[in-house]
Image: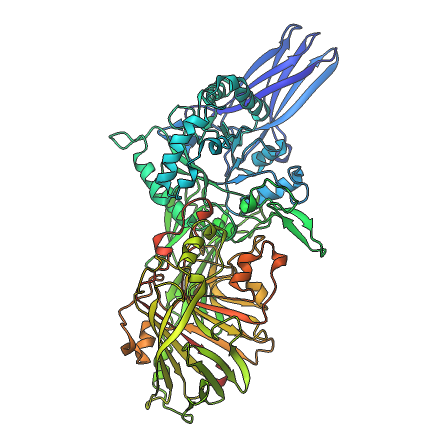
Amino acid sequence: MACRVEDFFIRGDLDSAYQHGNLRVGVDVHCPAGGTLSVVLREQHKNGGAVICRSVQNVDPSGRHAEFSLHVEDPCKWTAETPYLYDVDIALASDGVTASVTHATGFRKVELKDGRIKVNGKAIRFRGVNRHDHHPRLGRAVPLEFIRQDLLLMKRNNINALRCAHYPSNPGLYDLANELGLWVMDEADLECHGFAEVVATNAAECDGTEEVYQRLFNEIAPVASKYLSDNPTWKEAYVDRMVQLISRDKNHPCIIIWSLGNESFCGQNHVAMYQVCKSLDPGRLVHYEGDNGMGTTDMYSYMYPTIDALVNRALTKDVAPDGTASKPLILCEYAHAMGNGPGLLEDYEAVFSEHPRVQGGFIWEWANHGLEKTDDSGISFHAYGGDFGELVHDGTFVMDGLCSSNHEPMPGLVELKQVYSPVSFKMHDKSLVITNCHDFIDLGLFEITIQLEELALSSAKLLSTNSLVVPRIAARSSAVVDLPHAVFKHPSKSELLLTVSLKLSNSTPWSDAGHEIAFFQHQISQSTPRIIARELQAPSAPTATIDENCPLLKVCAGKSTFEFSKVRGLLQGWSFNSKSIVQKVESQQGALVPAFWRAPTDNDNGKAVPYWKSYGLHRLSTQLRGMRVDQETHSGATVLTMRLHIGPVSLGWGWPATTIYRIEQDGSSMTVMMYLDDPVGDAPDYLPRMGFDLVLPTSLNCVSWCGRGPGESYPDKKLGQRVGVWNADSIAELQTAYEVPQENGNRTDTRWVSISNDSASTVLRATRMSPLEAESYRLSEASDTDAQCKSGSDDALFNFTATRHSAEMLEKAAHPQDLVEEDYVLLRLDAAVSGVGTAACGPGPMERHLVRPGKTWFGFTLELPQTME
């Protein structure tokens, strides 16, 4: 009967000083004739293959198990940052036949020490994601190469950890994680939270606040757990899930935490699972989020807390009088990445940095779960939520990933990469402070380049590019680097912007040399308000003519004609040389309309949309209450002052408002200023946005802008986009093709935006008015100039997007092919936009990212640049 190696357990441990290694190998064999069993530790072939040590034991016919212990002098240590692997060769020889197996291993020590999760004596930070098995065509049958591409993409986006949610993954995934360097939380195939719905007859009472949810959960969980988790009849089945997991995956150094399952309440069966973990594999930690104090976990774990709740738990959860705590906190799920999101990443990361007890977490989740399908028109799309005729489904809640269903990066992953950066920068006087946020490595693997750009009114000019010598800053340490003096000596009336780029200096197993890890930008100087120069200009064109006898009030200035409604007080059209620049369409109240509504996002749909619609924000109407027309003698400009009421027709609230249009004498530009008073009546507490909608002809389809780009950004989701001058050759390029259509395409921190036809013969440029510009136009007497826009620290910056999809269409569409382009372009110019948050499953935007409806003013200048040359 042939001999065979039946099982083995390889553990590369370290001594208490984390210097020398102890290779422990347990081997189960079947060897009826007896023989010899050898264990060899060697370098992997890519590192030379040299033998480091070996051990040999005799095996008698009755022997079933052998233990080896080999001392290893100062081995290279395995971490997610230094994934150094060795090979272990196990060979059983009997009667001239040899059975052998080779498996990779790494030397590392995982501990719960000083209240922290530590590896090799150092506390670590999880910059993680939750990953389901998914393939857009093959479903759960995921090819290993597809998994490899997932993990490579994770590493390239500064992700260092993954949670196998909520079951063991393809065995090849762990080999890849060993090789590439990822901390892994391996989770047992256990979930039964559906029993909560059986018990929770009062779940509808939950208003979504964490306090109410926690109260309901505390009432429901003990009852629901009696079905399975706290039912001794199921103990053996629970323990079997854990034993299977450990038995299969125990030899992978990347796995540092076993998880008892997901959302299965907590009961005596979890205690048994925890005990078997510690018995079979005491060298790893154990996680279970559902533990409310029964001691089945080595860490406190939470899902989707608010920022305030997370900070409170960090400061108070089982904290001793001396401020110490025996266990750390992690977030096994947070920042729900559904649709246009997640927001709040910067805020969560700030908590992780300010409270080291909170050792990071795992974003929910890695990728959408859509499956390829072809509709009746032959269009391929990613189906979800009943698209295959299934009656029971999760709707859009399977479309909640950082990547699309094709596992391509979405804007949320772009944001995550910057937030998860393992190196941070800040300016101190004229020096750059560099902080190495890695847990183990210094910065010897990286290079830094700096660029200085001049951001002018229509373009960007690269002034200089330099390389910085990167000091070998140790992990969790900082250094100050002096910047070249020339950076600060460029005279310019335009904005000067410094961009720092951190890149790999050499190739790694997961990316090529030159791959950018992170960037940092700093404004060296601001631009000089150009309106001051304009104020000194004397009138040079004939005085504009005003015709108030037509159904529309007309102002003819130079080659431009402006038309205004006498009923709504809104601009109805602007033509130049008889060519339409801004136009009214039937579905809009005017060509330029005060606007507060946008299409919902997935994060809005649960709470915000019903709230906003209850106040009629999706159907506001503007009515004229009074109008005055003046012409300035010093400039020749025409000024129209419109007293308005803005509100829903059938509800008893609204804004008293004043809009002031100032048309230059030559018709080359128009400034529109909006003064909103405090709303009258029962008004909403916060708004989707605050700005203007402009209706443009479809011939204006090329866009340039100075601000964050090239992708979309929102107040709480903008760090991954850098400030610069960007171009889009079509309106479609500004859109984000979410697989579930929704609000998209906003650009933040905009200085100016230009939209033109293909030949650039017609160009419309928009800029935001600053308080200084408003004063120089002598508009300040129109209203209270102390009123400030409540969602922006710099009144010269604004948000914009351009689209051919109406908000109504985006809200109704289930798939991208449902979208039909309108016969106009909608250009949104916003003083403020509310953040996207994570409220599909988690908290909404922070207060500073909400648009409040109090007393406010904002204004924009619209120009035809070619008429000013």
Query: In the image shown, does 210 or 97 lie closer to the viewer?
Result: 210
Question: Seen from this angle, which residue lies furthest front?
Answer: 650
* Image quadrant in which you'd find residue 534: bottom left
**In the drawing, does residue 277 fall left or right of residue 380?**
left
Question: Seen from this angle, which residue lies furthest bottom?
Answer: 542
- The count of marks equals 0
- Answer above or below: position of 494 versus 27: below
Q: Which colour scheme is used?
A: rainbow
* Image quadrant in which you'd find residue 134: top right
Residue at image coords 33%, 76%: 774
- Answer above or below: position of 779 versus 308: below
Residue at image coords 38%, 56%: 849
Residue 798: % across, % down: 41, 66
Question: Seen from this angle, which residue lies furthest left?
Answer: 321
- Answer above or below: position of 838 versus 500: above
Residue 854: % across, % down: 31, 63
Query: In the image shown, does 811 or 429 lie closer to the viewer?
Result: 811
**In the drawing, does residue 323 fall left or right of residue 564?**
left
**In the drawing, does residue 425 fall left or right of residue 386?**
left
- Can residue 20 be spotted in the picture? yes
- Can residue 19 be spotted in the picture? no
Residue 85: % across, % down: 57, 32
Query: In the image shown, does 553 or 335 lie closer to the viewer?
Result: 553
User: Which part of the image, by quadrant, shows the N terminus?
Assistant: top right
Residue at image coords 33%, 44%: 308
Residue 518: % across, % down: 48, 52
